[in-house]
Amino acid sequence: MAENVQAKTEPGTATGDAPSLATSLADLPWSRNEAGRKCEESLKERPYDVELWNILIREAQPDGIDRARILYERLVKRFPTTGRFWRIYIEHEMRARNYDRVEKLFQRCLLKVLNLDLWRTYLTYVKETKGNLPVFREKMTQAYEFTLDKVGLDFSAISVWMEYVNFLKTGDVQGTFAENQKITAVRRVFQKAIATPLLNIEAIWKAYTQFEQGTNMTLAKKLLDEKSKDYMSARRVVKEYEAVTRGILRGTASVPFQGTSDEVMQMSLWKKYILWEKDNPLHLEDSTALAKRVSFAYEHYLLAFSHHPGVWCEAAMYMESVGKDLAEKGEMVTAKAWNDDVEALYERAVFIVPTCPLVYFAYADFEETKMKNEKVHSIYNKLLEVENIDPSLAYIQYMRFARRAEGIKAARSVFKKAREDSRAKSPVFVAAALMEYYCTKDKNIALKIFELGLKKYSEDTTYGVAYVDYLSHLNEDNNTRVLFERLLTSLPSEKSGSLLTKFLDFETNVGDLTSILNVERRRNVLLQEELKDRRSEER
């Protein structure tokens, strides 16, 4: 199962493909009672209201899984990072013994939602489905190792560590060699656990002490003396951890930014905690072990604040820096693994916050540093396919990438695509024109682009000012004056004020007194008209 989860989970899919039945019925009322119907109506206005969802969940729990599945799919689509909702869904499928579906659900969520209770459900699933197999102990060992590798750093994971130890202890072995292997395996798990800051770590140390003393009293003193330092360090950090994380609400569903004081406080507490982890309170000498603790903290931060693009980018940039450091040390295999994790993180990010250009730009920049130009093209095209966004900045960034990576012809192809997109705004033309001027040194092409844009944005004051600034930069005073007059002719009077001010500033710098007074007079007339209109409105 561990191999299946890792092999079949698509890094670019945050929740995978929902069943077709759920998709086809996604917009239909689900509840059968009046209270549930009211909740569904309210969710249209407040789709992230967890209390409303909880009412529907309670209705679904005693229901058959075929009907409940429709609600669960809506639920995990709305809250893809909330472990509790995935666990409720999976446990219902397990009660119905739909183990194929359970495995597919784990493939969709397990590696992306490092929620301890969800992973405990995974272990329960392996016990239930593999218990009668001849290779059960091997499968169960893999499941425990997989789980502890992913969530063993969780402050509340002591039960999983102890379960694994007890599982290893109960294994029947034949012969001295096999018995020694069993002792070594138990000792290895114990020693990793006592070096990990865990709630009630004293119980693990006590169990480890009893294990060593019951195995070999002579060797026990030596081993316990050697490992007591790790235990004392972890125990000290436990107290610090409790103080640093006090007030953090774990397990809450991630919702879009509300701007409440409680939300701001929670983000502040999470940032404080992550800074504390970065300060290496365990004094770890292994930089990779430290990085794993920090990235685990970021993963939990994202479970609560997955709708905040800045958190995704911050986590990705930290992991990227780890990969760079490892590459500089010559640890290329480990560095590649971290870079793969960064890519997977960005894929999750663009799924959760698909309308945020910041995440796409950061992702594209990361892939560009890896010389994966085709991947960068796909990232920008994916952003441009998002509906109901202004793609202007995306086109500008895309053009700049194309020019850097493939030359000016590639950038022109992107600009051509932008011209054909009715959503694109005037800044795309400004960026394309200036790129031609600064990169190809061809002012004529730049002028043609500005003129092309002027036909489309003749009433856009901002675009007109950008064109004026360009001509002023060329020191073409007469052409600049002609452009001012063209713009003022095409603009309605209520939009002409800022442009006349710009015109007056231009004449003040390069014109004669007559020109200055002429433009000033025109501006004063316009201001007087605006004042009259304002007074008329007040009456």
Image (cartoon, rainbow, N blue to C red):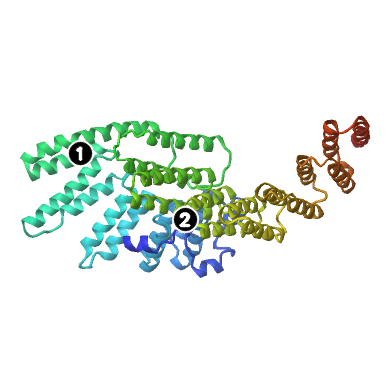
Q: Position of residue 141 (x, y in %)?
A: 24, 57
* Residue labelled with disc 1: 205
Q: Is residue 167 visible?
A: yes
Q: Nearer the viewer, mark 1 or mark 2?
A: 1
In the image, 139 versus 63, the foreground residue is 139
Q: Is residue 534 above or below residue 16?
A: above
Q: Position of residue 325 (x, y in %)?
A: 38, 43
Q: Position of residue 66 (x, y in %)?
A: 46, 68
In the image, 175 versus 411, the foreground residue is 411
Q: Is residue 488 above or below residue 111?
A: above
Q: Is residue 523 left or right of residue 196?
A: right
Tell me which residue sits at (37%, 68%) in the image: 100
* Residue labelled with disc 2: 58
The residue lying furthest to the front in this view is 441
In the image, 68 versus 227, the foreground residue is 227
In the picture, the quarter occupied by the C terminus is top right
| Mark positioned earlier in the residue sequence (1 or 2) | 2
Q: Is residue 38 left or right of residue 252?
A: right
Q: Is residue 54 visible?
A: no
In the picture, the quarter occupied by the N terminus is bottom left
How far apart are the alpha carbons under marks 1 and 2? 41 Å
Instruction: For mark 1, give the secondary structure.
Output: helix
Tell me which residue sits at (15%, 55%) in the image: 170
In the image, 263 versus 533, the foreground residue is 533
Q: Position of residue 42 (x, y in %)?
A: 60, 53
Tell me which residue sits at (87%, 45%) in the image: 482
The three-letter code of the residue at mark 1 reads: Trp
